[in-house]
Image: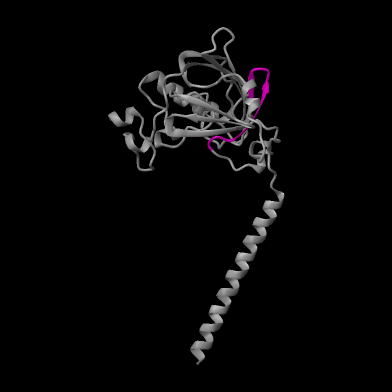
Amino acid sequence: MKFLSLLRTKLSATFIALIAFSLTAITSTSAQAQDDTVYPANAAEVSYAELDNLPDFRGLWFPAFRQVGGDEPVLIGEALATWEVYAARMAIDPNFEVPETTNNCEPDGMPYIMNFPYSVEFLFTPGKITVIQEALMQVRRIFTDGRPMPARDELDPNYFGYSRGHWEGDTLVVTTIGTQPGQRLGRPGITNSDQLTITERIYLDEDNPDQLHLDWTFVDSKVLAQPWHMTHTFRRDRTWEQLEYICSQNDRHLLDEEGQTLPPEEIRN
C-alpha cells in the first residue's frame, strides 16, 4: 500500500508538472499570437495587378565574369591582419584556397548568395521578392510591403540576414542586417562582423534589358574604415532552368582534425 501511495504521489506530481508546462506554452503562444502583425505580403486580400508595373526580372541571371567594379576596401583591426595573411599566401601560391564555410557545404549567406558563380532567379509576389540561388538551392526573402526594419539586437543572426526593400523608380533598393559574423564579404579572405549593413541597388541596364546591375554598399564598423562599394553585372537567359545542387553529394574536400576543409596546398602536401 505504501508503494502504491508513493507511486500515486509521483504520478500526480508529474501530471501537475505537465499541465503547468502545457499551460505555460499555451499562454506564451497566445500572447505571441496577439502581438503578431499581418503585413501586406501575407494579407488575406492582395492584388497581383501591381506586379505588372514592376521591371521584368524573369529568367535566370548569370554573373558576368570579369565585370566587377567598385573601390578597394579600407580594412581595420583583426580584419586587416587576417586579410594580410591570406593575401601573402595567395601571392606566393596562386592555387591557395582561403578556407571558407562554403567549403564545408554550409550556405554561402549574404552577400555571396547574390554573386556566386551559378544562376540567380527572382520571384515576385505582392509585398515580397524571393531570390533563389542555384548553388545549394539557397532561398532569400526581400520584404517590399513597407514593414519596419527590426532593430539589430532583436534579430537572431543567420546566413541571409533580414532584408527590406523598396522601389525607387525601376531600381530595387534593399537593406540587409542581421547576417551572422564570419561570412565572405566581397572577396575571399574578408569576412563580416555582427555590425554589417548591406545596401543593394538592383536594376536593368538602360540599353540592354538582358543585363542586370547590382551595386553594393557595405558598412561595417568593426571591419571597414569607410563604406565599401562594389558593382556586379549579370546576363539573362530565358531558356535554361535551375537544377538541383546538393553539395554533400559531391563534396570532395579533405578535412582536418577540426572538421575544416584543407586548402589545395595542404592537400598536396
Relative to the observer, which residue lies in front, 162 or 224? 162
Residue 134 is drawn in which quadrant? top left
Position of residue 223 measured from the top left corner of the image (x, y, whole percent): 59, 28
Position of residue 191 measured from the top left corner of the image (x, y, whole percent): 52, 30
Whether 112 is drawn above or below 210: the answer is below
Q: Quadrant of the C terminus?
A: top left
Dominant SS type (magenta): strand
- Tell me the residue at 71%/49% (across/down): 35
Q: Which residues are magenta?
A: 159-173
- Tell me the residue at 63%/42% (across/down): 155
Residue 73 is drawn in which quadrant? top right
In the image, is 143 to the left or to the right of 269? Answer: right
Whether 223 is drawn above or below 92: the answer is below
Residue found at the very far bottom of the displayed protein: 1
- Tell me the residue at 32%/34% (across/down): 250
Relative to the observer, which residue lies in front, 36 or 213? 36
